[in-house]
Image (cartoon, rainbow, N blue to C red):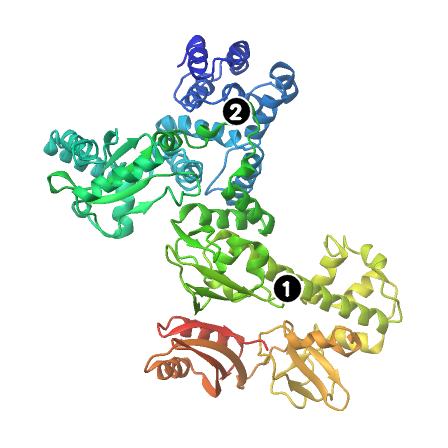
Amino acid sequence: MLRQFELVERVKSYDPSADEDAINRAYVYAMVMHGAQKRASGDPYFSHPIEVAGILTRFKLDTASIITGLLHDTIEDTPATLEEIEILFGGEVARLVDGVTKLTRIQLQSDHTKQAENFRKLVLAMSEDIRVLLVKLADRVHNMRTLEYVRNPDKRKRIALETMEIYAPLAERIGMHEIRNELEDLAFTELYPEARDSVVTRLRFLREQGGDLVARVIEQLRATIEGTGGSGVQAVVSGREKTAYSIWRKMQRKSVGFEQLSDIMAFRVIVPSVEDCYRALGAIHGAYPMVPGRFKDYISTPKPNGYRSLHTGIIGPERHRIEVQIRSQEMHEVDELGVAAHWKYKQGSRNMDGRQYRWIRELLEILEHAAGPEDFLEHTKLEMFQDQVFCFTPKGDLIALPNRATPVDFAYAVHTAVGDMCVGCKINGRMMPLRSELQNGDQVEIITSKAQTPSPEWERFVVSGKARARIRRYVRTQTRAQYMGLGRAILQRAFRQEGYEFTEKGLEGVLKKFKAASVDDLCGSVGQGNLTGHEVVAAVYPGIKMTRLGKIVSIATHRNKPKPKDTSVTIKGLIAGMAVHFAGCCHPLPGDRIVGIVTTGKGVTIHTIDCDALEQFADQSDRWLDLSWGEDLDGTAHIGRITVVVTNEPGTLGSLSTVIAKNQGNITNLKITNRTADFFDMLIDVEVRDVRHLTNIIAALRANVAISSVERAHS
């Protein structure tokens, strides 16, 4: 455990202006507040915040961060209060301590919602001041170092898993590679101990077999760069093994054995300037063959966390295949310290606004669009875990995207409005489908239209959290608006039938009875069919006597009526004797939620509740009927319509019809609506028993390799 004077000396060594008195007072305050508390290891509890502060000094953090490390557990675990801390140590420290304190321990598997909610809090806190994240990372590092003392094995695995899934990727995103490597290795030890032992044993064997191989390679690389015929650049060369976890992850990703990996060793070349980086690269490529596909220029296209370096794979000295990283001294400091290398206090300002980092801004946008904490956690994991591809706009602006990204992901990365209005794209000047996967270096031009809105289909192929969150939000908003509009129309008609005026004030009085938060929620519930309009009228006016029509509709929702003359199944909610037709626009099936539209001289036309054609009747609520399917379905065939995208290959159509036939479906009509060199878009009418039968057929079609996508048509 660090002693008081040792901690102060560490801070003063890199920041002579540090407030020594404040650090001393915080050290003593933490010891007094934690008192006789013990950790699982048996050590005094105050050893933990002192070690956290010590970890923060490795990254040369400012006085406020060090004091926050010392005090980060005092409010949660001791009698200390935030007001007291503000009085003793100032508003900045109080704000940071409060930000860390609010991030209560995340429960990954036992309480997923709590984990998601607290991760949301973490993003909000670090967007205001990223030092909150740095203290939290240091806290997690020390907790992982002492994880072995936690007796409950399930708890150990939960902590290790959340470290691997959340904290290590966050450390990577802010360039704290040393922290990320340590967190991954500690979590790897707990989650996959046998795999780690195997990799470490093989690395030890290679080290013993190679003897002084690393030293020989370092000397030859330095001579190549500095010597006669080289670049003449002064270079510092060092070698290191890749971490056990990164080796194991590569073995899993590429499905190869340890012996098949050829870049276990990486050599780092540090030179004075950017120009020297490229001169050193030229010298190395001039002396040794380059491995195709292994060169990456992160200087001209930095990683999202600010990492810059040249990476190249070569058949190097003594015919060993190695990876070489070339960077300037400044780039090396950023790689070692990450975000800490850019502390604003070095320029006299202490503004640590996390919004300066684009990825944090994108997480905040996802937070705005997500339906809830769990939705947010899902999308942010997408953002943090995938490798990057780098693409360009027509103006040459660089856009970093997750691996397997599509033009729709690209459009949303440019701007949310561009994504919403995207109708097509050009990749390297050629028109391509929106579902195309982008490759490194692609130039992407997005074609937009003000009439376009996000398509639910896009969610099937987008990979970025930002795009998926925005699409889901739009679909959710549109669906809610449709239900609210339909429910409001049903209520207006029900009130009018009973001779009352529809008013929102009247509905506000019954919100509590129906457990609705607002009038809009109540209307949405009616639109979804969870309530009938007449149930709401009866709640607003408990003493009324319903009209004859109201009684018929109300009774019909609870009791079967005689089978209508023109249908083969019972429809609840119809007035006896009315002619019935099924709409050709949406093809309602038994099992769908349905409504009826009354047309003079034609009877009732039945639509699915989400049919687009219902919009034209929105202001004619007197023509709407609440309907539902009866229970005496007799297996009579109904027409279900689907849209199918198939590959343009021989035998595809035969395969499609075979799948439908094997699932007891019958094609009654087929129309090709669009064709390209690669795909056919089709509209197919299929005879089925009910919506479940159609759903089974769709599932079977989706499993066929010749079929790209299948959806039910609603218009």
The residue shown at (45%, 43%) is 109
- Quick one: label 1 or label 2, which is nearer the N terminus? 2
Can residue 320 be seen in the rendering of this structure?
Answer: yes
Q: Residue 107's x, y, as percent?
A: 49, 38
**Label 1 residue SS:** helix
What label does residue 300 carry, if any?
Answer: none
Quadrant of the snapshot with the C terminus: bottom right
Which amino acid, by three-letter code, is at mark 2?
Gln
Label 2 Cα crowd, 10 Å radius (few <14 / some 14-19 / many 20+):
few
Q: Nearer the viewer, residue 383 or 511?
A: 383
Q: Nearer the viewer, residue 590 or 338?
A: 338
Between 372 and 469, which is closer to the camera in this rendering? 469
Instruction: Judge from the rendering whether residue 169 lies leftward or rightward of residue 199; answer left or right.
Output: right
Residue 109 lies, with reference to residue 340, above or below; the image says below
Please state the horizontal and vertical placement of residue 29, each as a whole percent of the image. 55, 12
Q: Tell me the distance, in whole angstroms, between the alpha carbons under discs 1 and 2.
A: 51 Å
Residue drawn at (81%, 69%) of the image: 492
Q: Can you tell which quarter of the image residue 206 is in?
A: top left
Residue 479 is labelled as 1
Residue type at tag 1 = Thr
